[in-house]
Structure formats: structure tokens, C-alpha cells
Amino acid sequence: MAKYFFACLSFLSVQAVAQQYYITADRVFDGESIHENWAVVVQGDKIIAVGPKEKITAPINSVKINYPNSTLLPGLIEGHSHLLLHPYNETPWDDQVMKESDAYRMARATVHAKNTLLAGFTTVRDLGSEGAGYADVELKKAINDGIIIGPRMMVAGKAIVATGSYGPKGYDTDVIVMKGAEEADGDNLIKVTRDQIGHGADVVKVYADYRWGKYNEAMPTFSIDELKLIVATAKSSGRWVIAHATTEEGMRRATLAGVETIEHGDEGTPEIFKLMKEKNVALCPTLAAGDATSQYKGWKKGIDPEPEKIKKKKESFKAALQSGVTILAGGDVGVFAHGDNVRELELMSEYGMQTLEVLRSTTSINAKAFHLDNQIGFVKEGLKADLIIVSGDPSKNISDLRKIKLVMKDGVIIRQ
Ligand SMILES: [Zn+2]
């Protein structure tokens, strides 16, 4: 009896103290800079201590983790994903929207979520279900409920497009073709914004321009007043608005209307980036999307000369870097394979951004832009224990982010 009681007590004491980890690494990137020979203590779902190894003692009973020649970083943050999409060279976007059922797409999305997390991306800002309704809201719920594994998600739901501007299009008018986002205009934008928020959108996405010009070129859609209406409506609920914009005028209108981030920004000029900086609007350049679609169209990278589209993107990215506008890391993943998110970071480095800056973008800078810096994006006492360990030094070679040794989300080891 006494023995039994004792066994129970020790069981209780183990349960009372949350799991502790004492993690050491050759380098710790804390979201801002690199520190050598640091240690991190995790308890439960939180980071409880960080600093030089000699100053941080390992708690008794903590599990010790160390990999040789390793770098520990905050869990990476994907700034622009579509977990409900899969690569367009597998199935064109039109067919995914119109021929794949939401149920089928959701089944795929559960695998995409897992692959994203295993690649070290512990958070995603998922910017539109592209015709799958609020499946992104449900996917997020399934992850939060612990039914499937996946990154913490910030979702946009259906997203808003101007009537007549978005696809799929080009079908006989006798056929009612569903759209990849919700159409709305004028005063109706208030209702649609509220409805999307009511269905679980964390952030409202609007298409400030789209390829609906006479020659299928990108042209602005909403007026500044319409965009302002969306921003004001979202703001009163504590949400913010982000805009798809590739044209100079679309970017200008979105910036003046008060959106927080601009996605793509392909035709951004030094003047536009300057205006964005003044208005505190960040750029999410999605370099990997253009890199992927150009290759789907037949460009043999490294063999063929660079397509005009890529040359121009490199130029505008350089202008963005020089302007000092805040640059986020988000690849529009879904256009290319989930789990290959590092591709965007490699391109940012290839197109001229310092590797340390790239690391900041995908951690602390994304976290701040998404209003999540009180939870994630840094290796800091009190924050969520979303951590990854890679071998090598990604501050020198960004591709070392692919050499994942450990992924921890909310203090739980997902991959080791
Ligand atoms: Zn996108």
C-alpha cells in the first residue's frame, strides 16, 4: 500500500512540472543576430531562459539536446502561403478551383500542413483558400485541436475581388463559373468584409489589381475609396487588410487606403517603395512564385537566358532593398510545393539581400508585421517555444535551412 502511494506521488510530481529541455547549439540566431555558444531552456510551451551557456544552468530532469555544428533559430514564418493549393505544373489553377472538390482539397491540405511544419515553418500567413470557401479556417481549427500536425495559421478565408476581374474566366456565358475569391464592389464591400470576418478571417485580403486589362495585363480594380471602406470595416473589428498588387497604381491605391502589406509588388518603383515606407506598409515580394511559373512555362533556369519577367522582378526587388521598405518573407507557396518554402529565402539571397537580413525577414520581421511578435519570431524568454535546429550556419549559407535536425512547436518536438 505504502509502495503504491509512493509511486503515485512520484507520478504526480512528474506531471506537475512541465517537460523541460536544455538546448545548446554552436550558434543561436535569436531573430535579430547570431550568438555563439548559447543555451535555451524550454518549459512546457514556453522559452524560459536564453543566454550564454555558462550563465544558463540546465534544470534537473531536463532533456538535453545538442547537435554538432548546429544553429538554433526561431521557428520560421511563411508570409504568403496557400495550403489549399498544390503546384500548378501538377494541376492548373483553374482546374484546382473548378474540378477539385473542397473535400479533396482539404485532404491534400492536411499533407501540405504537415510538410510545411516538418520543413521548419512553424507559422504561416495563409492568404486565401482560392475557391475552397473557409476550408482554411477549418484546417487551422483541426491543427489547433491537435487532430493533425501543422503550423500555427493566420488565415484570410475567401478574399475579396472586384466583380469581373478574377478567374477562372473565358467560359461560355451559359455556364455559371465559380470564382477563386468573393466578388464585391461599392457599399457591398462593408457587408462582405464583415461576413468574411464573421466566418473566421484573421486578416482581410483584397485584390487591388488583377489581370483584367484589354490585353490580359494587370490593371487596378478597386478605387481608393472602396479600399478605404474595406480597411475601415476590418479595422473596427481589430483586423487589418493586406493587398494583392502588382501594378504601380494598384500598389499606390492600396498604400494610400491603409493596407498593412502589399503582396507581390512586381512593378514597384523607387517612388512607390518610398511611399510604402512613409506609410509603414511592408512588401511581401513572393519571388519564388514567378521563379516557379516561369519554369512551368518552359524556362530552363541556369541554361536559358532569364525571361523578361525575372529580370524585371530582380530590378524591382533591388529598388525595394535600396528604399528601406520593410521586406517580408513569403513565397506564395502552393504555386510550388509545400515544404519547399526555403526556396523564397534562397531567392531573396540570390537577388541581393544579405543572408542575415533574410533570416530576420522570415522570423522577427514577419512576426512584427503580423502582430505576433509578443508570441513568436524571436528566441526570447517568455515567448512560445517554436524552435528549429539546422546543421551548418544559415547566416552564411541560407540553404543550410534545409538541413533540419529538429522542429519544436509550442514546446513539443515534432521532428528529431
Ligand atoms: Zn498568393
Image (tube, helix red, strand yellow):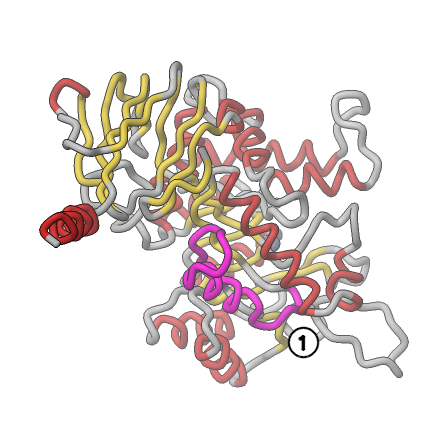
* Residue ranking furthest to the top: 69
Q: Residue at x 49, y 51 (%)?
A: 150
Q: Quadrant of ligand 1?
A: bottom right
Above or below, comparing residue 206 to residue 360 in the picture:
below
Look at mark 1 in the image and give the residue it sits on.
163
Q: Residues within 10 Å of mark 1 (few under 14, many from 20)?
A: few
Q: Nearer the viewer, residue 346 or 141?
A: 141
- In the image, residue 149 lies in the stretch drawn in magenta: yes
Q: Which residues are magenta?
A: 130-155
- Residue 245 x, y percent position in the rendering: 58, 55
Name which residue lies at 15% across and 31% down. Answer: 60
Q: Amino acid at mark 1?
A: Thr
The quarter of the picture where residue 133 lies is bottom right
Q: Quadrant of the C terminus?
A: top left
Residue 345 image offset from top left, x and y in percent:
52, 33
Report whether 63 appears left or right of 211: left
Residue 31 higher or lower than 56, as above or below = below
Circle 1: element type? loop
Along the line of sight, which residue is nearer the eye, 135 or 221? 135
In this view, the residue farthest toward the left is 2
Q: In percent of the image, x 59 and y 79: which residue is there?
A: 185
Q: Is residue 356 above or below residue 99?
A: above
Residue 328 screen position, x and y as percent: 45, 43
